[in-house]
Structure formats: C-alpha cells, structure tokens
C-alpha cells in the first residue's frame, strides 16, 4: 500500500502518492561469549570509599625522665617515646630527651600541644620530691654533720602543704617551683583522662607532694 493523507484546503490542489520503499532488515549480531554471562554488578576499579587511615603509633610520655630508663624499656617494646626533663638534668639520658623547664608556661604549652596531637598510650610523671621529702624531718647523723653535711629543715607540713611560713628566699623559690610542677602534673592528668590513656605519678609514699597534688 501507500501512505496517503488529505489535508483540508480551498482552491486547486494536487494529490501525490509516495512509492513504497522496502527497508532492509537490521543484521542479527550474536553477543560475544564474554557478554553472554555478564554479572549483574560490574566491579569498580576503585573502592567506593577511601580506606581507613593506618592507626597512629602509640606514644609513651615520661616527664622528669632523668636517665630515661622507663622510656628505654618502652622503646625496646617498639613504643614511640617522648622523654622530657629540665635543661639542668643531672642524669645522663639513655634516650633522646626533650629539654624543657616545665615551671615556665611556654614550655608547658609546648608539651601539652605535642601530647594533644599524639595517640597516647600512657603518661608517667616522676615528680621531684625534694621540697616534700619527710627525710627533712629527721636529723642528719653527727658523723655526717661533722663532715659538713647541713641539716635541712622541713619546707612543708600538714598545716602548710604549699610551704611553711618564714622560708628563706632560696627555700621559697624551690617551694614555688615545686608547687608549679605539681599544678602542671594535675593538668597532665586532666589531659590523660580526656585522651583515655594511662597515667601514673612516682613519689615516696609519705611525701608531702601527695598532699600538694590533692590540693591543686
């Protein structure tokens, strides 16, 4: 047959017929073998989500580290260490040691910033106990006094844990420095609690420094 269409028109008009055109059938293409059993989901060349970052190495921090034996033991276990002591540390460190005067606020800030950025395993503080030592309450043996060993006097008491009255200028400076180190130790404890890591303090059992820490 032919395609025929009449349109409304006024006046002369001409009708035309279009000849039928036979179109060839499309060729049949057999799917390749690799396409006949295609998986429902094509695996992606890259992961849909980025992989998790590798865990940061745990850090052990030893404050007032002295010779650094504790840091050395952790290093032997493969734990990264941060050992800190004063620039005038009288011990010979067995590990790399960060020299910081932790009575100074700038040094305290540097250490806190370093620890905030670390994956902390534990913090250990060997708090200096000289001003809180109960040995000051015991008399020096006469033999030692005869050799010129002075008799130190107590710098703290149950009624005056932050320092007894009438201290000399030198004694007052020592007590104030130790008080500041104790206050900073409490700040380190707060950081450890916030980070969820272990925390320990080393001092003689009967040291007045425990009372100082409790009062900070």
Image: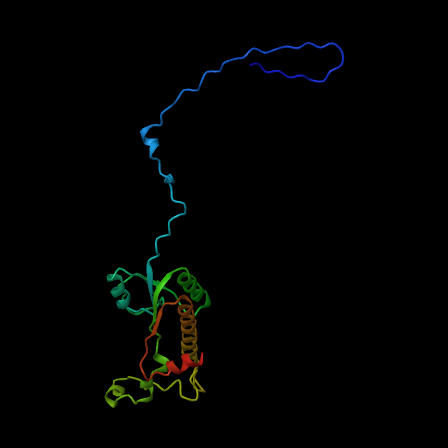
Relative image position of residue 143 (x, y in whole percent): 23, 88
Quadrant the N terminus occupies: top right
- Name the residue at 33% across, 58% down: 57
Q: Nearer the viewer, residue 66 or 197?
A: 197
Residue situated in front as seen by the camera: 80 or 95? 80
Quadrant of the rendered structure where residue 93 is? bottom left
Residue at the front extreme? 1
Q: How is colour applied across the structure in the image?
A: rainbow
Residue shown at 40%/63% (left/top)?
A: 115
At x 33% / y 35%, what residue is drawn? 37
Quadrant in which the C terminus appears: bottom left
Q: Which of the 4 quarters of the picture holds residue 212?
A: bottom left
Instruction: Say how many tags the image has.
Output: 0
Residue 171 in view of the camera = no
Depth check, front residue: 115 or 128: 115
Q: Is residue 6 above or below residue 187?
A: above
Above or below, 156 against 198 in this view is below
- The image shows residue 39 at horizontal and vertical percentages of 35, 38
The image quadrant of residue 176 is bottom left
Image position of 18 (left or right of 143) = right
- Image coordinates of residue 127 in percent, x first then y, are 35, 75
The reply, left or right, for residue 68 in relation to residue 197 is left
Q: Is residue 169 above or below residue 33?
A: below
Can residue 161 be seen in this snapshot? yes
* Residue 138 spot, x, y in % from top left: 30, 89
């Amino acid at each position: 047959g032919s395609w025929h269409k009449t349109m409304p028109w006024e006046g002369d008009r001409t009708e035309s017929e279009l000849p039928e055109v036979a179109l060839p059938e499309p060729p049949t293409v057999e799917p390749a073998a690799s396409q006949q059993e295609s998986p429902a989901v094509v695996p992606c060349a890259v992961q849909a989500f980025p992989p998790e970052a590798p865990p940061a190495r745990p850090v052990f921090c030893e404050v007032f580290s002295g010779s650094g034996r504790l840091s050395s033991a952790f290093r032997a276990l493969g734990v990264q260490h941060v050992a800190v002591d004063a620039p005038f540390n009288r011990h010979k460190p067995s590990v790399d040691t960060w020299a910081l005067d932790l009575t100074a606020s700038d040094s305290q800030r540097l250490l806190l910033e370093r620890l905030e950025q670390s994956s902390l395993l534990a913090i250990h503080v060997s708090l200096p106990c000289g001003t809180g030592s109960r040995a000051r309450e015991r008399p020096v043996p006469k033999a030692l006094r005869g050799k010129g060993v002075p008799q130190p006097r107590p710098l703290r008491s149950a009624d005056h844990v932050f320092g007894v009255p009438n201290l000399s200028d030198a004694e007052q400076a020592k007590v104030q420095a130790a008080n500041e180190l104790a206050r900073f130790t409490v700040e380190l404890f707060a950081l450890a609690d916030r980070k969820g890591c272990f925390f320990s303090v080393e001092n003689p059992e009967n040291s007045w420094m425990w009372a100082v820490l409790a009062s900070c």
